[in-house]
Image (tube, grey):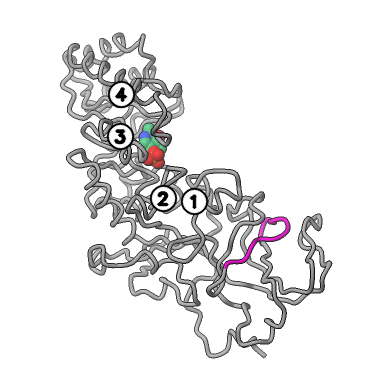
Amino acid sequence: MLPPSWQNKPVTFPERAVEIDLAALRHNIRHLRDVAAPARVMAVVKADAYGHGAIPVARAALEAGAAWLGVAHISEGVALRRAGIEAPILAWLHTSHSDFVAGVEHGLDLGISGWELDHVVAAARELERPAIVHLKIDTGLGRNGCPAQEWDELLGRAVGYQDEGVLRVVGIFSHLATADEPARPETDRQVELFREAVTAAENAGIDVEIRHLANTPATFSRPDCHFDLVRVGLGIYGLSPFADQGSAELGLRPVMTFSATVSTCKEVPGGQGVSYGHAYRTHEATTLGLIPVGYGDGVPRIATGAPVLVGERIYPVVGRIAMDQLVIDFGATGLVDSPESPLGKRAVLFGGGQAPAVEDWAAAAQTINYEIVTRISDRVERVHLHVDDAGDAGDAGDAGSNGAPSGASAADDAGVDDDARA
Ligand SMILES: *Cc1c(COP(=O)(O)O)cnc(C)c1O
């Protein structure tokens, strides 16, 4: 016999999936446009849009008014072009393996820190088409970007190529190190060096159309960093970069909901060891629920104790998280045969509304919200909701429609489009 919770009940949510609410994403883009105006918004969709699915996210971001897309690798930009996306795309992280010919051929703008310049020019010559570049100055992050003492030389080389007609420098950019901690002084110094780098470029004869420095935290906390364009990743996914402010305080709506179906529910006595190593033992008789996601799905193995919403209550992950599954403790008995049996119900690890926040999982895993969403593995299906802009109804939808606490899921929504599943 089917357990009570399965009787007469169509399954209205995916077995195991991350749902990506593109209406929330569009809301976030529009909000960020307001925050950044008159600067424009680059939606950063590297790393498969921080795990949200680069192609549907890029399309929705552009629909909502993002002017640019940003990726790390040329290959990521080429994939967007192959999907038919024609908006400006900037790719900024290259190696000797990078296919600069493909980059130029597909009309990507390329970020240049130094050595790449000659490779990009070689590609431009081969294609008989000028490369479009943004020169990157290292104003203090200490990763890529041209060191300040080599900036004039890079400008000189770029101007030489530009005069030859094989290159066009349209932008100057840099990346911030500490903008998520607005009280720190390093950002002031970075802004100052950035302004100097732009002035030097202008003095070298470059017509700097697009200056860009801000990431998500600087977009919110440092209007002096907005310049012509802000490069926003985390914020478009509805997450806060600040330790002391959540999504709602920034006017953002979390886009990703990670849920799975409770696959086993059973009563155990006190003293029952749970999962490998018996790192947890029940204190007294209780009911355990098995959730079929684990580190093979990108759930951090160290996140024991993290919260999971089932029905209207939050339960902790107990014992070790395994490759395929994790266990939660319902802390009660008598559930198994009751009409309230959790078996077959939806378990939400994180999402909007009443669901735990991505930040709760980040805290349990001693990491940041960026990593939690980005690391969800390909084993987990991405289901894109509200793919069609028409049902968007402005910002009227409430954030709570995501991560619905009872069985009902946003996946019921007519906005689900199979073709858009990435
Ligand atoms: C990833 C990245 C961003 C976006 O950062 P967020 O903090 O997610 O907004 C912006 N610029 C560069 C160069 C990046 O690598």
Location of the C terminus (image quadrant): bottom left
x and y percent of residue 117 in the render? 33, 19
Q: Nearer the viewer, mark 4 or mark 1?
A: 4
> Which residue position holds label 3?
222
Label 1 residue near ligand 1, CB within 8 Å: no
User: Which quadrant: the N terminus?
Assistant: bottom right
For the magenta stretch, what is the residue range?
314-325
Q: Does the image show residue 73?
A: no
Q: In terms of sequence position, does the residue under pointer 3 or pointer 2 come before the other?
A: 3
Measured Cα–Cα span from mark 3 to mark 1: 25 Å
How much space separates mark 2 and mark 1, taking CA atoms?
Answer: 10 Å
The residues tagged by marks 4 and 1 sit, at their Cα atoms, a distance apart of: 30 Å
Return the mark for residue 288. none
User: What crowding class fits label 4: few (fewer than 14 Cα within 10 Å), some (14-19), or many (20 or more)?
Assistant: many
Residue at 42% over, 71% down: 411
Q: Residues within 10 Å of mark 1 (few under 14, many from 20)?
A: many
Measured in 3D between alpha carbons, the distance from the residue under mark 3 to the one under mark 2, in whole angstroms, is 17 Å
As drawn, the label of residue 373 is: 1
Inter-mark Cα distance, 4 to 2: 24 Å
Give how far across and how far down residue 363 sits, in percent.
57, 48
Q: Residues within 10 Å of mark 2 (few under 14, many from 20)?
A: many
* Label 4: element kind: helix
